[in-house]
Amino acid sequence: MRVRVLLPLLTLWLSLAIAHSEDPSASYDPDRFFRTQIQPILETRCYKCHSEEHGAEGGLTLDSATGWQTGGELGPAVSPRDLKNSPLIQAVRYLDSDTAMPPKKKLQPIEIALLETWVLLGAPDPR
């Protein structure tokens, strides 16, 4: 249980440390965090089945903020600041074989941790 909470926080700390090493005067930018850490995961691992361009399996699109906020058949994909009630997080954790996503290959632990961190931060999405 502690690992599930600490890993996203560690990931966030590392992301912020890297960002500050590039520009020590920069402050945390939630939109930048989304664009550099979250959007690439969604693009490479989710858009094939969950985007306007490629299809909206289960009625869910993840290529816009409105898409995940409205959600699909299960409702909104993310409950900001609430990992337990965010279907996206439950799916990528592979807790239920019926809803596990992506269906063929689980995300890397760092990808899951970044998505968890994003949700804990309130799911900022500038799109």
Image (cartoon, grey):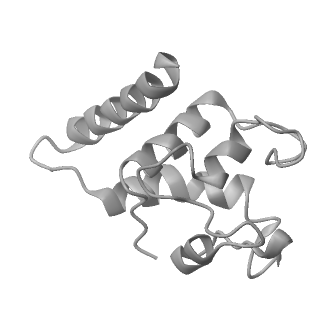
Residue placed at 78% from the left, 71% from the top? 73
Answer left or right for 8 relative to 28.
right
Q: Position of residue 96 (x, y in %)?
A: 82, 39
**Numbered label tally:** 0
Image point 51% across, 58% down: which residue? 79
Q: Which residue lies furthest to the left in this view?
A: 25
> Considering only vertical position in the picture, is 33 above or below 105?
below
Residue occupying image coordinates x 35% and y 29%: 14
Quadrant of res 80: bottom left
Residue closest to the eye, 46 or 6: 6
Vertical position of residue 84 compared to residue 30: above or below: above
Could you tell whether 123 is left or right of 25 in the image?
A: right
Where, by quadrant of the figure, is residue 51 drawn?
A: bottom right
* Rendering coords of residue 102 (x, y %): 80, 48
Horizontal arrangement in the rendering, residue 97 relative to residue 65 (left or right): right
User: Can you name the residue that lies furthest to the top here?
Assistant: 2
Q: Where is residue 81 in the image (x, y as percent from the top left)?
A: 41, 50
Q: Where is residue 114 in the image (x, y as percent from the top left)?
A: 50, 41
